[in-house]
Amino acid sequence: MKSISSAPLDSLVATTATAVDEFRELGHAHVPGVCSRDEVASYRPFISDAAQQRNPEPPPLETRDTYGKAFVQSTNLWRLDDAVKAFVWAPRFARLAADLLGVPGVRLYHDQALFKEVGGGPTPWHQDQVYWPLDTDRTITMWMPLVDVPDEVGSMTFASGSHRLGDIGAFDISDASDATVEDLVTARGLPLQTYGGMPAGDATFHAGWTLHRADANPTTTNREVFTVIWYADGARATEPRNLYQQWDLHMWLKGTAPGEIADGPRNPRLWPPPVT
Ligand code: SIN
Ligand code: NI
C-alpha cells in the first residue's frame, strides 16, 4: 500500500567512529539499520513505481550485453515523485555521507534504482568515478536494499584500499573492466571484502574510486536496491574526459559548465539540510 506513514526521514542515525575509520581506510563501510523495515516498506512502492515509469519495458535479458544483464538502472527518480524526492533528499542519508567523507557538506549527484532481475548477471568489476566529471575524489555512493538480500545474491564485493589508487584505467562497466580489475586485484593481492546478504534498510557506502563488483541473481526474486550519490560541497565540474562524462555533465550537472562550482538545480546541497 502506498502511504508515507513514517516520513520524513529527518531524524538522524549515529555515524559511528568504526564506520568512519572503515570508510577512510578501506574505501567502503557497512551501516546497519539506516532505515527501519517500516520506513523502507513505506517508500518502496513509490520507488518501484518511479523505476517502472523510467523503464517501462526493459529489453529481454538475453539481448543485453554484460552491463545490461547486471541490472535495470533507473536514474534520478527523485525528479519524478515527491515521496521519492523526500527519500533521496533525506538529511539522515546526506549526514552519513558527509560524516563518512569527512566533509562539512555534500551535494546530490544523482540517484538510481538498480534492480538485479531474476536471472540477472554479475555486476562486472569497475570504478564509478570514471563516469563523473568532478574535480574531487570526495564522492560517495549509498547502496541500500529495499528487500532482504539473501546470501546467494549478496551485496557488493569491494577491493579494500583501492580508493587510494585513483583512476586505474579500467574504463566503462564491461567484460573488459572486469578482466582489467581482476588482473590488478590479483597482481597486487588487494584484500576483498563483502558484507554478504543484507536486510532491507541496511546500507553500504563506497568511495568513487573504490573497485567493486556484485554476484548474479540465481533466485526467483528481484534484487531491489536503491542508490544515492553525493559529492563534497564546493567541488567543480571538469572538462569531460570521455563520452560518458559528457553525458553525465549534461544529465546530472545540468546548468554547470566545466570549471564552475557544481551547484546547479539538480545538485541541491543536502547536508547541512537546505533551508525550507
Ligand atoms: C550493483 O548493485 O550490482 C552494483 C552497484 C554499483 O556498482 O555501485
Ligand atoms: Ni558502481
Image (cartoon, rainbow, N blue to C red):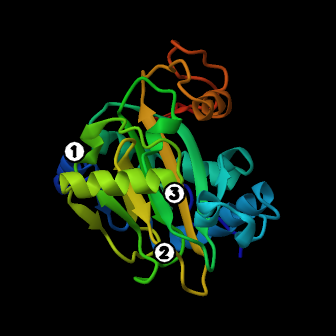
Residue 270 screen position, x and y as percent: 49, 37
What is the residue that sits farthest to the bottom in this orientation?
A: 220
| Residue under label 3 | 175
Q: Are marks 2 and 1 in contact (CB under 8 Å)?
A: no
- Does label 2 or label 3 sit earlier along the sequence? 2
Label 2 and label 3: CA atoms lie apart by 36 Å
Label 3 and label 1: CA atoms lie apart by 29 Å
Q: Nearer the viewer, mark 3 or mark 1?
A: 3
Q: Is mark 3 within 8 Å of ligand 1?
A: no
- The kind of residue on which mark 2 rests is Arg
* Res 12 seen here: no
What is the residue that sits farthest to the top in this orientation?
A: 259
Label 2 and label 1: CA atoms lie apart by 28 Å
Residue drawn where x is 53% and y is 44% of the image: 172
* In this view, 54 is above or below 70: above
| Residue under label 1 | 24
* In this view, 32 is above or below 83: below
- The kind of residue on which mark 3 rests is Asp
Residue 68's tag is none
